[in-house]
Image (cartoon, rainbow, N blue to C red):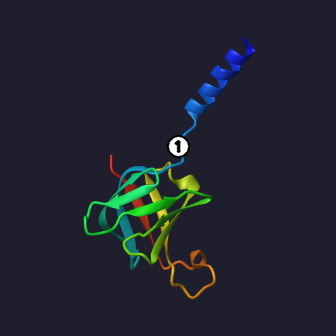
Amino acid sequence: MKYFALLITLFFIGFNQQTSHLNGRYHYLIEEDGAYIQKDKITFKDSVFAFDNKYLPKGKISYGNVILLDNFINTDLIISIQKDQITKDTIPFFMHNKNSSSANYLDEIVGKGRLVRIK
């Protein structure tokens, strides 16, 4: 009987946990000269994202302390998102260049923007 109660408790704990993955469709906006300019739409599904523009490549999402979007627009650009932001409708992000002169390219920010959920 106590195993049955433990199983039910674990089931409800697992059922109530929120996902820590990006899912859904978003507009992405890039900040230029203090204003945000809407560029395109992105569809996220677990560990892959794709642009609505068919000429842009698909990319991979790495989940860790910071979420990284690899292969964003081109192969040298990486997007970083704070993990606690992905549950919000508007997600701020930072752009980093892999060919940066600094030792860790994630330390140097080359741009920023926002992802806005499409409902």
**Amino acid identity at mark 1:** Thr
Residue 9 image-quadrant placement: top right
- Which residue of the protein is positioned furthest toward the left in this rendering? 54
Q: Quadrant of the N terminus?
A: top right
In the rendered image, residue 46, in percent from the top left (x then y), is placed at 45, 50
Q: Name the residue carrying label 1.
A: 19
In the rendered image, residue 88, in percent from the top left (x then y), is placed at 48, 50
Up-down relation of residue 119 to residue 103 (above or below): above
In front: 76, or 106? 76
Residue at coordinates 39% horizontally, 79% vertically from top-left? Answer: 33
Up-down relation of residue 10 to residue 4 (above or below): below
Q: Secondary structure at mark 1?
A: loop
Q: Residues within 10 Å of mark 1 (few under 14, many from 20)?
A: few
Total marks shown come to 1
Residue at coordinates 34% horizontally, 67% vertically from top-left? Answer: 57
Left or right side of 96 for 40: left
In front: 38, or 59? 59
- Which residue of the protein is positioned furthest toward the top in this rendering? 1
In the rendered image, residue 96, in percent from the top left (x then y), is placed at 50, 76
Left or right side of 114 for 81: right
- Which residue of the protein is positioned furthest toward the right in this rendering? 2
Residue at coordinates 62% horizontally, 79% vertically from top-left? Answer: 104
In the rendered image, residue 92, in percent from the top left (x then y), is placed at 48, 62
- Which residue of the protein is positioned furthest toward the bottom in this rendering? 101
In front: 104, or 33? 104
Left or right side of 38 for 87: right
